Image: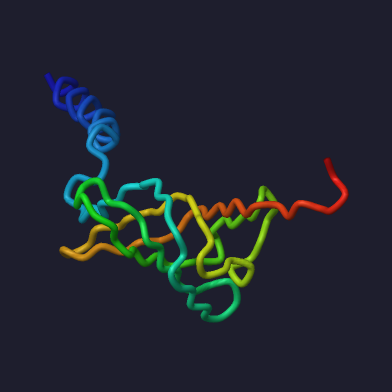
Amino acid sequence: MAKTPRNLWRCISSLLPVLLLACPGCGEDKNDFEVISLEGKVEKITISTGQTGEISVRYYSEKHEQEIIGKGLITKETEIQINGVVARLEDIREGDQVRGEVRVEKKGGKNKQIALKIFVDRPKPVGRGEG
């Protein structure tokens, strides 16, 4: 009879890690977020230090059925490309048409937008004498 409680304890202790894995984040505060794709026109760029700053983009929100100006933080991890070439925040111009991905973090009833990727497609100049 003495072996049964010990075996039971071994069984329970071996299942405990499995139960914790089956319920990740149980009892923890979760940071809710989603990644959305946006496309619009750059209204304003604010450059802080290094490659960080903020970008304001005017885009059409289907949810609100109107144009909205959204602001997103630019971090050192934000991927920026212009015409397929790696670029910097300073290379983006007000008025540029942009598309990209934004991580929207929801904390305490407030949303924080962080730009993950920004792609600018500018028209290429047409040279003379072609055609």
Image quarter of the C terminus: top right
Q: Position of residue 13 (x, y in %)?
A: 24, 33
Q: Residue at x 28, y 30 (%)?
A: 18
The answer to which quarter of the image holds residue 51 is: bottom right
Q: Position of residue 88 (x, y in %)?
A: 63, 66
Note whether 61 is above or below 4 in the view shown. Answer: below
Query: Is 95 left, or right, of 125 in this rendering?
Result: left
Query: Is 16 left, or right, of 45 in this rendering?
Result: left
Q: Position of residue 46 (x, y in %)?
A: 48, 78
Q: Residue at x 25, y 62 (%)?
A: 111
Q: Residue at x 58, y 68 (%)?
A: 89
Q: Residue at x 84, y 53 (%)?
A: 128
Viewer-proximal residue among 104 and 57? 57
Viewer-proximal residue among 27 and 101? 101
Query: Is 88 left, or right, of 27 in this rendering?
Result: right
In this view, which residue lies farthest toward the right?
A: 129
Image quarter of the N terminus: top left
In this view, which residue lies farthest toward the left?
A: 1
